Amino acid sequence: MLEPLGQHGSGDAALRRLERIGVLSRPPHTDRWRTTRRWQGAMARAALLLIHQHETTGDPRIPIAMALVHLAGPSASDAELTEMVDALLPIELGTWPMRQPPHDAAH
């Protein structure tokens, strides 16, 4: 999913770092960010680990943070990780399929 550049104000530094570590890219001739295959793989591994741990909160920040810790490594501070999670959250949420409300059989 694509996210407009600069929508996060102070998150611009986080977006640039995410680009440097191979999480985000900018296709030519666009002002939007796109997640990379590297990021998608890290998210898949984080989701699988959470499933095995029976994690049921449904909070999308958890797999995002897990994947970032894996990719950013120990050099990322807590503040940097938080900023990167905040920058990635709307991008990731935009990639999830929209859920249709349950159809009410009575109507």
Image (spheres, rainbow, N blue to C red):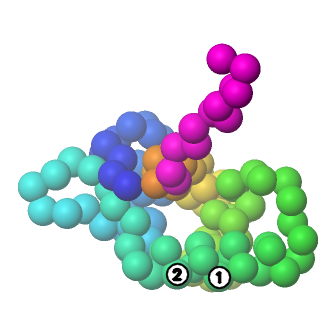
Q: Nearer the viewer, residue 21 or 105?
A: 105
Is 5 above or below relative to 45? above
Q: Quadrant of the image for the C terminus?
A: top right
**Residue at position x 16%, y 52% in the image:** 30
Image location of residue 96, percent across then percent down: 52, 53
- Does residue 67 belong to the magenta stretch? no
Task: Please state which amino acid type lies under the numbered disc 2.
Answer: Gly
**Residue at position x 36%, y 47% in the image:** 3
Task: Please state which amino acid type lies under the numbered disc 1.
Answer: Arg
Question: Would you identify the image quadrant in which residue 53 lies?
Answer: bottom right
What label sits on residue 97 in the rendered view? none
The residue to which callout 1 is attached is 45
Q: How many marks?
A: 2
Magenta highlight range: 96-107
**Residue at position x 50%, y 51% in the image:** 97
Q: Going by the picture, which residue comes out furthest to the front?
A: 106
Q: Nearer the viewer, residue 20 or 75?
A: 20
**In the rendered image, is residue 13 in sight?**
no
The residue to which callout 2 is attached is 41
**In the rendered image, is residue 39 in sight?**
yes
Helix, strand or loop at mark 1 = helix
Q: Is residue 41 left or right of residue 17?
A: right
Mark 1: give few (<14), some (14-19) or many (20+) Cα within 10 Å: some
CA gap, disc 1 to disc 2? 6 Å
Q: Is residue 35 left or right of residue 74?
A: left
Helix, strand or loop at mark 2 = helix
Mark 2: give few (<14), some (14-19) or many (20+) Cα within 10 Å: few
**Residue at position x 45%, y 81% in the image:** 38
Image location of residue 1, percent across then percent down: 38, 55
Mark 1 and mark 2 residues within 8 Å of each other at the beta carbon: yes
Is 7 above or below relative to 79? above
Is 84 above or below relative to 22? above
